Image: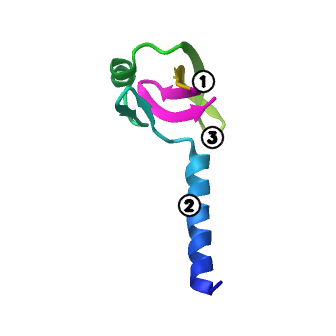
Amino acid sequence: MNRQLHTGIVVVVAGLSAAAASGDEAFRCGNRLIEPGMTIGEVQQLCGPPTKKVDEVQDVRSGNRVVGKTTFHRWTYESYSQTRVLVFDQDTLKSIEDE
């Protein structure tokens, strides 16, 4: 195998691995695409209510100091044979995880 082809294959494989590990993917809700950056209201309007909701309050830190609190919302949607967990920080979708 020539060196350029080998380098190209390594770059493509590394890119695919990074994308798969990021967790920040999209999923389809009906015929609409749900992506990080959307609001709770937008997701609920497009997908309806989740199968399960879990809220978690966490400390916000600056160094070793707690400077406030934030609420993470974990919404579970079952879609066909896959279960997705949407993680919101306050009102914004931050990530989509496979369960």
What colour-coding does the image apply?
rainbow
Among numbered discs 2 and 3, the one appearing first in the sequence:
2
SS at badge 3:
loop
Relative image position of residue 34 (x, y in whole percent): 40, 33
- Most extreme residue toward the bottom is 2
- Percent across and percent down for residue 52 are 56, 13
Side of 16 where 37 appears, left or right: left
Give the alpha-carbon distance from disc 1 to disc 3, as whole Å: 15 Å
Residue with the mark numbered 2: 15
Instruction: Decide whether residue 96 is among the magenta residues.
Output: yes
Question: Mark 2 belongs to which amino acid?
Answer: Gly
Q: Position of residue 29 (x, y in %)?
A: 41, 27
Q: Which residues fall within the magenta stretch?
A: 81-99
Q: Which residue is mark 3?
A: 63
Q: Which mark is residue 58?
A: 1
Q: Quadrant of residue 18?
A: bottom right
Q: Residue at x 59, y 71 (%)?
A: 9
Q: Is residue 56 above or below residue 86?
A: above
Numbered tag placed on residue 94 in the rendering: none
Q: Amino acid at mark 3?
A: Gly
In 3D space, how far apart are the residues under numbered discs 2 and 3 (Cα atoms)? Answer: 32 Å
Q: Nearer the viewer, mark 2 or mark 1?
A: 2
User: Can you tell which of label 2 and label 3 is closer to the viewer?
Assistant: 2
Helix, strand or loop status at disc 2: helix
Side of 29 where 61 appears, left or right: right
Task: Determine whether the residue tagged by mark 1 lies in a helix, strand or loop.
Answer: strand
From the viewer's side, name the closer residue of 32 and 68: 32
